């Protein structure tokens, strides 16, 4: 799953309106943030295998330290504790922990059986990626639902808060669809570097426009 993770981050703003959106985005993407350097270091591995599923040409056969459920639970707890140490925001800490673990749950829906519970365990996955239509419906529903919750929880203070936010939403949709129909990457290093650069850009962008929005309390509290 790709764009669905961002939908979860947007939606978590409803749970933790004081938490910076960039922190929530980093939480839901934490597995992939770790995966990119782990690929470059040779600690985890991927194969280019066109046709492995109908959605992606990647055979994700070895990534237990970044993507197993146990390790994500540990990473989530560590990040939540670090966040809580610097910010007096318990809701934000819980949202970060939930965001990190949610990555496994959403990947379990889309991936074939390549996600371990813990390093060395049996692997799981429902294989939604074998249906292009099903993948689009599920991921876009999660993403658009999260965006809707974000707009119900925050409001723009200025033009940056309004237009940079909507540009971000459109950009994610464009790269989501474009990635599906682009040529497969040549090797793991290309995947890692492109992913690392994209992550930095998306996190800085989210931090920028979210800083120009504010929690709309009358929307947060029913």
Image: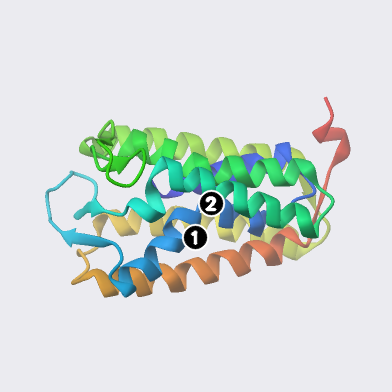
Name the quadrant containing residue 49.
bottom left
- In the image, residue 37 lies at what x, y percent? 39, 70
Q: CA distance from mark 1 to mark 2?
A: 28 Å
178 and 45: which is toward the camera: 45
Residue at 56% from the left image edge and 35% from the top image edge: 145
Q: Nearer the viewer, residue 50 or 141?
A: 50
Identity of the residue furthest to the front in this view: 120
Ranked by sequence position, the earlier of labels 1 and 2 is: 2
Above or below 190: residue 162: above
- Left or right side of 34 for 59: left
Q: On the rendered image, what quadrant is the C terminus found in? A: top right
For label 1, the crowd category at 10 Å Cα-Cα, with few meaning under 14, some 14 to 19 and many 20 or more, is few
Q: In terms of depth relative to the viewer, which is nearer, 189 or 9?
A: 189
Q: Residues within 10 Å of mark 2 (few under 14, many from 20)?
A: many
Position of the N terminus by quadrant? top left
Q: Residue at x 40, y 59 (%)?
A: 175
Color theme of the render: rainbow
Residue lying furthest top in this view?
Answer: 222
Q: Is residue 75 among the parts visible in the rendering?
A: yes
Residue identifier under label 1: 171
User: Is 141 on the left or on the right of 203, as rendered?
Assistant: left
Q: Which mark is in front, 1 or 2?
A: 2
Assign a secondary structure to mark 1: helix
- Number of the label disc, if any, that sits on residue 75: 2
Would you say the residues marked 1 and 2 are in contact, meaning their CB atoms lie under 8 Å apart? no
């Amino acid at each position: 799953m790709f764009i669905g993770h961002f939908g979860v981050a947007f939606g978590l703003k409803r749970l933790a309106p004081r938490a910076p959106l960039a922190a929530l985005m980093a939480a839901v993407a934490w597995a992939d943030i770790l995966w990119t350097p782990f690929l470059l270091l040779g600690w985890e591995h991927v194969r280019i295998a066109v046709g492995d599923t109908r959605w992606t040409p990647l055979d994700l056969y070895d990534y237990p330290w970044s993507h197993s459920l146990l390790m994500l639970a540990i990473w989530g707890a560590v990040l939540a504790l670090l966040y809580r140490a610097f910010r007096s925001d318990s809701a934000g800490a819980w949202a970060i922990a939930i965001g990190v673990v949610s990555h496994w749950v959403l990947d379990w829906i889309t991936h074939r059986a390549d996600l371990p519970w813990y390093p060395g365990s049996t692997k799981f996955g429902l294989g939604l990626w074998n249906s292009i239509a099903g993948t689009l419906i599920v991921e876009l529903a999660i993403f658009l639902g999260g965006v809707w919750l974000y707009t119900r929880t925050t409001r723009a203070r200025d033009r940056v808060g309004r237009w940079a936010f909507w540009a971000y939403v459109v950009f994610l949709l464009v790269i989501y669809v474009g990635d599906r129909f682009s040529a497969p990457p040549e090797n793991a290093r290309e995947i890692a570097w492109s992913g690392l650069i994209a992550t930095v850009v998306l996190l800085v962008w989210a931090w920028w426009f979210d800083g120009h929005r504010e929690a709309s309390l009358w929307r947060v509290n029913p």
